[in-house]
Image: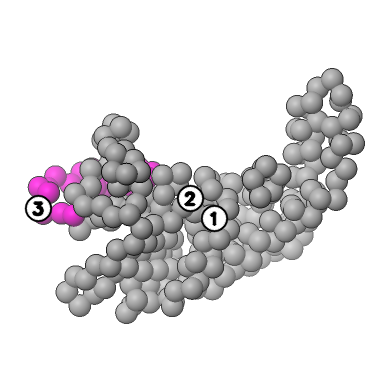
Amino acid sequence: MLNATGGHGDAHGPCHFIHVKPDNVTDLSHGFLTRELAPGVFEKKRDGRRLSPTRVFSEKLTLRKGSRTLLLERDEFHSSEGDLIIYLPEEKVMMAVDLLAPDWVPLLDFDITGNMFAYLGAFDRLLAYDFETFISGHTADIARREDVERTKAYAFDVYETVKRIHGELNVAELLERDRDNEQAGIKLLIDEVTARATEEVKSRWLNGPMRGVDLWTESHCRAMLLYVRWSD
C-alpha cells in the first residue's frame, strides 16, 4: 500500500521505481485527487514521478490492516493541491509532511506553504489528536508532540509581531514618499515591516530552542506580511 501525502513529486518518494500491477498496490491519495475536484491530475503533470491512484477518497478514510488502524484525513496546510494527514491511534503516531522539522524553524516561507491561513490553523487541528510521535518528512529525525507545540508558538509569534508592526505603520505616509511610483511605496512597506519584524523575532528565538532562525526568519516575516496585509 502506498499513501501519497501531497501533490508534490517528493511526497510520492521513489514510487516511480516500483512496477506493480494495480491489484498488488493501492495508492491511497487524498481528496484533491477525487474526480469532482481534479480529474487526471497526475496525468496532467506528466512528469513520471507520480503513480496514478487506484483508489481515492474525499475528506476522511479509516483503514484497517491486520491489527493496525490508520486514519487518513485531507488538509491544505502546504500544497496547493492538498495534503494528507496520517494518524495511527493505537501507536499514537501522527504524520503530516511539510509542516515542520524537529529542532528547526520551518523552511523558507513557512515550508513554502500555499495557504498561510490553513498552515496556521493546522497546529490546533493536529494537536486535537492524541499522539506522542510526529513524522514530519524530509528528515530521518523523529519529532514529538512538543515539536508541534514549539513550532506553533514560533509561527504565531511571527504572525502577531508582523500584524502589530504593520498596524503601527502609517501606510499612507509610506506610500506618499514616492507619489509617482505607487509600487515603490508598496515595496518600501514590505521591506520596512519585514526588517522590523525580523529583528524583533530574532531577538527572542536566535539563541534557541530551534535552529535556522538566522536562515529563514526573514522569509517567514515577509511571507507573513503578504498574508496579513492582503489575506488575513
Q: Describe the colour scheme in one phrase.
A: one colour
Tell me where residue 145 appears, x and y as whole percent. 49, 73
Vertical order, 80 against 159 (above or below): above
Which residue is located at x 29 percent, y 52 percent? Answer: 29
Look at the image and say whether residue 20 sits in the magenta stretch.
yes
Span highlighted in magenta in the image: 7-26
**Three-letter amino acid code at disc 2?**
His
Structural crowding at the residue carrying mark 3, measured as other residues with C-alpha within 10 Å and reported as few (<14), some (14–19) or many (≥20): few
Alpha carbon separation for disc pair 2 and 1: 7 Å
**Numbered circle sitting on residue 75:** none
Residue position marked by numbered label 1 in the rendering = 119
Vertical order, 203 against 17 (above or below): below
Give the structural element (helix, strand or loop) at label 1: helix
Residue position marked by numbered label 3 in the rendering = 23
Structural crowding at the residue carrying mark 2, measured as other residues with C-alpha within 10 Å and reported as few (<14), some (14–19) or many (≥20): many
162 on left or right of 173: left
Q: Is residue 204 visible?
A: yes
Q: Of the residues under marks 3 and 2, which one precedes in the sequence? A: 3
Tell me where residue 201 appears, x and y as whole percent. 73, 57
Residue position marked by numbered label 2 in the rendering = 78
**Viewer-closest of 75 and 106:** 75
Q: Is residue 97 visible?
A: no
Which residue is located at x 58 percent, y 58 percent? Answer: 120
**Three-letter amino acid code at disc 1?**
Tyr
Give the structural element (helix, strand or loop) at label 3: helix
43 on left or right of 184: left
**Viewer-closest of 151 and 59:** 59
Give the structural element (helix, strand or loop) at label 2: loop
Say which quadrant the N terminus sits in: bottom left
Q: Of the residues under marks 3 and 1, which one precedes in the sequence? A: 3
**Three-letter amino acid code at disc 3?**
Asp
